[in-house]
Image: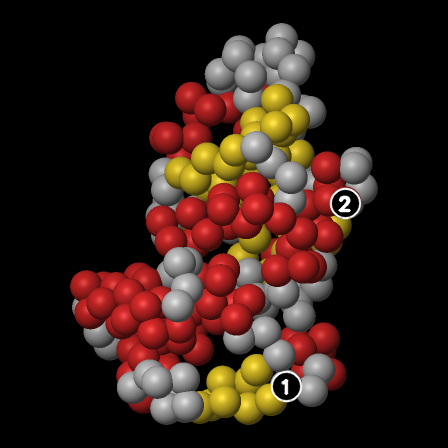
Amino acid sequence: MQGSIYVNNPDWAAVVDDHPLVAHGIADFLVTHCGFDRAQPVSAVAEFWPLLDSAAPPALAVVDFWLPDGVSLPLLAQIKQRRPALKVLAISADDDRAIAEKVAAAGADGFIHKQAAPNVFAEAVTAIMAGEAWFQGQPAAVLASMRELPVTAAELGLTPRQGQVLAMMLKGLPNKRIALNLSLSEHTVKEHVTGILERLGAKNRIEVITKLRGRSLEY
């Protein structure tokens, strides 16, 4: 099917991220804060193609730069080739400035770091849906200029290990990378993530980031 056959449905979006918690968190945010009636999270590219080729494809696709098969640059290019009208926002937890340039060259309409504040993510989505480009650079300089109130893992009611996991969650890292960095099993990391969400009274990672906005985690 070619992109010119059907009109993109402006009421819904798709989120492609191999980490279910991240995908569902972004999908929920798109509905609650960005005006979409529905947002469909998928964790595999194979699940995305039927959505793209449906009679009423999504108006927006939020795509993680890193997927199980590698970088998503070929996917971004294919999306734009098959559905030129579909807006594409690439996301990543990496601080490499070249990523924004690479996804732009692949046809994406924007790029945002996973560590960006929720309101910035909403601004990016709004701009892209209005036909504007949004290519945010790495947020390190912005974050460094903000005065943040330090908070320890203990003050949040978390163990030191949970504090380490939370720090990586706030950087947007998936369980697989957290497990690798901390030399833990993915199952153990998942248990820590569940404990952190319960302790902070959050449903997903997006809510955790929102709750800790303006705080600098120390562990």
Q: How many discs mark residues in the rendered view?
A: 2
**Which secondary structure, mark 1?**
loop
The alpha-carbon separation of the residues under discs 1 and 2 comes to: 27 Å
Residue 182 located left or right of residue 118? left
Tell me the residue at 46%/35% (across/down). 40
Q: Which of the two residues, 64 or 119, is positioned nearer the viewer here?
A: 119
Q: Which of the two residues, 41 or 3, is positioned nearer the viewer here?
A: 41
Residue 204 located left or right of residue 36? left
Q: Which of the two residues, 219 or 174, is positioned nearer the viewer here?
A: 219
Tell me the residue at 33%/83% (across/down). 158
Q: Nearer the viewer, mark 1 or mark 2?
A: 1
Tell me the residue at 67%/59% (across/down). 119
Camera sees residue 14: no
**Which secondary structure, mark 2?**
helix
Camera sees residue 10: yes
Q: Position of residue 33 (x, y in %)?
A: 62, 48
Contact between labelled residues 2 and 1, with CB atoms less than 8 Å apart: no
Amino acid of disc 2 = Ala
Which picture quadrant has residue 188?
Answer: bottom left
Indicate which disc, 1 or 2, sits on the residue closer to the N terminus. Answer: 2
Q: Classify 85 as above or below 41.
A: above
Residue position for label 1? 148
Question: Which residue in the rendered view is the most extreme toward the front?
Answer: 201
Residue position for label 2? 127
Q: Position of residue 104 (x, y in %)?
A: 69, 45
For label 2, count other residues whose C-alpha is less than 10 Å away and answer few (under 14), some (14-19) or many (20+): some
Q: Report the quarter where the C terminus lies.
A: bottom left
Which picture quadrant has residue 43?
Answer: top left
Q: Classify 190 as above or below 212.
A: above
Amino acid of disc 1 = Glu
Tell me the residue at 32%/68% (across/down). 198
Which picture quadrant has residue 125?
Answer: top right
